[in-house]
Amino acid sequence: MRISRIFSLFSAIAPPAPRTDEPGRVLTAVERLESDTRLDPLLPPIRRRVRRIPRGGRDLLHGRQLGHPFHPIAVQVPIGAWLSAAALDLMPGEHRAADALVGVGLAGAAPAAISGWADWAELHKPHMRVGLVHAVLNVTAVALYGGSLAARIGGRRRLGRTLSFTGLTLVGVSGSLGGHLAYRQAAGANHAEQVPYIVEPGWHELGSMSQFPVGEPVRRTVGEVPVVVVAENPQTAHVLADRCSHLAGPLSQGKVADGCVECPWHGSTFRLSDGYNVKGPATAPQPVFQTRVVSGMLEARFTPHGAQARTSGTGGTGDGQAAEE
């Protein structure tokens, strides 16, 4: 009886539990940020400055050679170092190690920031708005950690620890925005990853070869999957998934040159013969379809061994005759 009264009293004074049938306050605030246009005047000039980095350098920062974004790897150094420094600050006699880790985090912040800006410059406006606030929080955190290191060197350890913990708090808030960018807005995700799982098996007729002008991208569908068809000659064609792996731009509206197709949105360039992403910002190759011509009709099918096809150079090219099933 006494226990039930305690629970009743607690229920009366406790704040109401958050509702689970509607978005939470944090998500609502971030979604408002996505559509807040007040930051928009800042976006173009910052983007232009970032794009002054040579294309090859930006591809390295994107992580094109890795096959996935470099930024999530780079941020492990400052986050890990600063989190470890915070733990050591709470332990007696570990101030030198904590000071060293603050410095390591500051050194690692530079490549993390540069790679983040490179990715940011190739996103849509809703992504960029969230990303800009994410960056401002990170810059403020770096400034706080810089002040912390200076205070530590100057012997003002209490101030140094205070600045570090404040900076770590901002890093945590910034990290939650980064998570929203990556997982809610799918920035940096492979937007063609689902193709192997939704394309229908077997050969699919795409139309007569006469319907595909040589060197011109044409949109067709394989089941429910949009594809881009580019005829190499009247007997041979290449077929790739139409939606760019970077941010789902329509490759069928892009330019074809030098055996590649360029996305019209952000310039990612894919080799027609095997789907390889020869230029970023895309970090993942484009799904490629095998093709054949039967009685003048172009047919395509997706093979689960697409990676092997890319390696051998046989994926996506037609030989003008029916292939074995």
Image (spheres, helix red, strand yellow):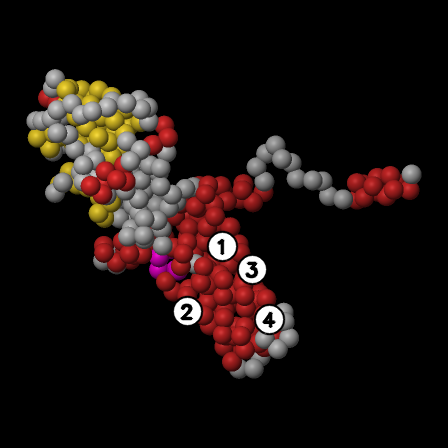
Q: In this view, does 277 lie above or below 174?
A: above
- In the displayed structure image, the side of residue 135 where residue 207 appears, left or right: left
Pointer 1 local density, CA inside 10 Å: few below 14, some 14–19, many at least 20: many
Q: Which amino acid does label 1 sit on?
A: Ser
Q: Name the residue under label 3.
A: 169
**Camera-nearest label, 4 or 1:** 4
Q: Is residue 214 visible?
A: no
User: What stretch of residues is rendered in magenta?
Assistant: 112-116
**Magenta span contains residue 229:** no
Q: Name the residue under label 2.
A: 107
Q: Name the residue under label 1.
A: 174
Label number found at residue 89: 4
Q: Distance between the Cα atoms at labels 4 and 1?
A: 22 Å
Residue 22 pos. (x, y %): 59, 34
Residue 225 pos. (x, y %): 31, 27
| Residue at the (54%, 78%) spot, across then down | 96
Residues 202 and 194: in front is 202
Q: Which amino acid does label 4 sit on?
A: Asp
- Give the main secondary structure of the magenta stretch: helix
